Amino acid sequence: MKLSSRLQKFNEPETLKMAKLGRELRAKGIDVIDLSLGEPDFDTPEHVKQSAKKAIDDNYSHYTPVAGYADLREAVCVKLKRDNNLDYKPENIIASTGAKQSLANVILAVVDNGDEVIIPTPYWVTYSELVRLADGKPVFIQSSIESNYKISPAQLEEAITPKTKLFLFSSPCNPSGSVYSREELEGLADVFRKHPDILIISDEIYEYINYKGKHESIARFPDLKDRVIIVNGLSKGFAMTGWRLGYIAADPAIVKGCEKLQGQITSATCSVTQRAAIDALTGDLAASRDMLKAFTDRRKRILELLAAIPGVDCAEPDGAFYVFPKVDAYFGKKDGETTIANADDLCMYLLNTAHVSTVTGTAFGEPTCIRISFANSMSNIEKALERIKKALAALH
């Protein structure tokens, strides 16, 4: 059967692939520890669940406006003012079935054939593939562990061409955990001021998982705000991955474009989720703060354990719940039968030998690294890192 050539433009997400392989081994009775998926191992806060139950009882079971309920969009505006001191109106907001759909909507709405989209490395696996799906061209700016995986204004300036349509980045970053400070964002903003036609997608889904203090958004600069598209959602900060609600805050023209696309694909996201989201966005953030405390402890511990493994070099993440160690010291080594040529091989070796699932850095644009999630229990993290240490020690 011949399928669309469109499917050849992009790859299956490596994060989902590794999770799937881990599940297959687990189904065979093998004890696999999953450090691949970016999913908090916490339950949704109680007050959010109660809100969803009430919504069911109140018969919120019908189609909603494509962009989301009006009071949900207002709740997003309240959150943006409270947490980010940013002023938006409901006409600037559209809710979607997760932040991934929000990103897809925006990219498909603004990128034309041949448009260039600048993406700093490392980047979330889906960024580049959505650009290709939209017939755009990803242009990567290489960062390094020495720069804590952040780019400089000079690198940004050098990457811009007359074909540049969009700049796409995340802070806190998946997979590196890097967080841009206000001063660093100001440096990038100075470059964008010289190029007024470039749009900026700021993926802020890890906003609440920040180990260095207050989150800073590039939308904070008034002269850039109309060009910035904030992407955010509930999955990471509220442990609501399965609820599927993301949103954007953007110029009304972009919102209308996204609404037109979404109306032909999914229409609105789940009505019950929307009602629960109102309470999540405007309610008590105590549960989110408790998650951050747990992630802080796990971050400290996983960095200690990685530091005890020879040949592993790891920057300290300032946000999100991943470490992104350099592991190229193990490339070319073997355990007798298996030769490790690259990060892909190393991840498969760790899965099949140590029974720990991780994700190759190649998928994130950094082929010398692997991504390890610490969104798992402390005991599982300690057990997994002991297995990794033992498996790596067997390579010579």
Image (cartoon, rainbow, N blue to C red):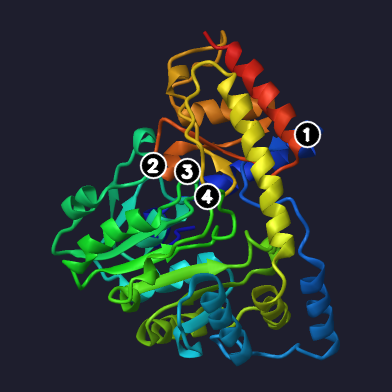
**Badge 1 is on which residue?**
379
Label of residue 6 in the image:
none
Query: How many C-alpha atoms fall within 10 Å of the one at disc 1: few (<14), some, or many (≥20)?
Result: few
Q: Is residue 344 left or right of residue 200?
A: right
Mark 4 burial class by Cα count in 10 Å: few <14, some 14-19, many 20+:
few
Q: Name the amino acid, label 1.
A: Ser
Horizontal and vertical percent position of residue 53 = 84, 79
Which amino acid, mark 4?
Lys
In this rendered view, identify the residue nearer to me: 320 or 214: 214
Q: Which residue is mark 4?
A: 212
- Residue kind at label 3, given as amino acid type: Ser
Q: Which residue is mark 3?
A: 176
Q: Earlier in the sequence, mark 1 or mark 4?
A: 4
Q: Is residue 29 visible?
A: yes
- The Cα–Cα distance between marks 1 and 4, rounded to whole angstroms, is 25 Å
Q: Answer whether residue 115 is visible to the viewer in this image.
A: no
